[in-house]
Every structure is written in structure tokens, then in C-alpha cells.
Image (cartoon, rainbow, N blue to C red):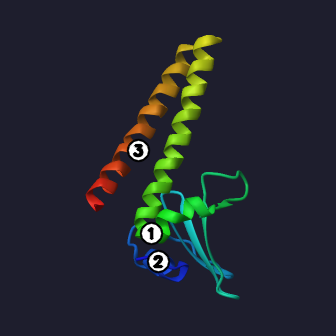
Amino acid sequence: MRYTLEQLFNQAVLDNMATILDSTIAEARMVYGCKIVREYEGGIIFIQNTTKGGDFYKVLTDDEMEPFFEKGWRHGVYILALDNYRRKLDAIEKFIRREMNGRQNPKIITSLKSHRERILSKYNTITNKLNHEK
């Protein structure tokens, strides 16, 4: 079964883990850095990645949307969260390598390693949830 954006939004509304972000112009829900928005005027629905884009969240690409359409809201959220964690882990690894090859400040290296451990813990938690979903 393929889900529509309307069905995905309804699943997000029923998701008890989702944070409610309603405003005067739109209804919105967010879980693990994934935000789904339905505008009041026009009823346009879109999904954004809140960990990308700096000041403005990025709307998901067609490839990023595919897990949502195939298996629903929560599955898509988990897949997106894992991608975000992988991206963060890659950035941390680059910072660690740069510090090890540069100043070699033990405080910074320790801080980066503990940050990496926190992200890995979150990554493993989401992976376990995704595995239990199947």
C-alpha cells in the first residue's frame, strides 16, 4: 500500500510522540527532526527535515519521501532520523581527524568523542525501533 500525504499527515496527528507545532497559518507535527505541515489556506502538505538547511528547513526530496509513501509516517521518520544521525557522525569524525592532525587539544577531542557516543546511542535506539517495527 502506498500512502498519500493526507494519510501521512493524519498518522502524524495521531502519533502520540509527535510535538504539536500548530500556528495561525498551519497545523504541524514533529518527531525526531521530521516536521510535517498542512497549511490552512489551500491545504498544502509538505514534510521538512529540520536538521538541514540552517535558518530555513529543507523540504524532503522525492528519494527522501519514498519511505514515507511506502511504509507510513513513523517508518519514514525513523529512516530520515538515521540518515541525519549518519550525517552528524560523519561530520564529527572529520572534526576528530582534523583535531588529531592539528592542535591535538585533549578537551576538544574528549568532547567530540562523547558527542559521537551520544549520537551513536540515539542511532542504535532508532535502529532498534525500526527492527521491532518489522
Quarter of the figure with residue 78: bottom left
Residue displayed at 61% across by 17% down: 99
Check the image and report above or below for 85 versus 21.
Answer: above
Q: Earlier in the sequence, mark 1 or mark 3?
A: 1
Residue displayed at 52% across by 27% down: 112
Which disc is residue 123 wearing?
3
**What amino acid is labelled 2 in the image?**
Tyr
Relative horizontal placement of residue 103, taking residue 124 as reference (left or right): right
Name the quarter where the N terminus is drawn: bottom left
Front of the two marks 3 and 2? 2
Single out the residue that lies furthest toward the right: 55
Residue displayed at 72% across by 58% down: 56
Callout 2 crowding tier (Cα within 10 Å): few <14, some 14–19, many ≥20? some
Q: Position of residue 63 (x, y in %)?
A: 58, 59
Check contact, mark 2 vs mark 1: CB within 8 A: yes
Q: Position of residue 127 (x, y in %)?
A: 35, 49
Residue to which mark 2 is pinned: 3
Q: Position of residue 121 (x, y in %)?
A: 37, 40
**What amino acid is labelled 1 in the image?**
Glu
Residue 18 at least partly seen: no
Mark 1–mark 3 Cα distance, whole angstroms, equals 22 Å
Single out the residue that lies furthest toward the front: 1
Q: Earlier in the sequence, mark 3 or mark 2?
A: 2
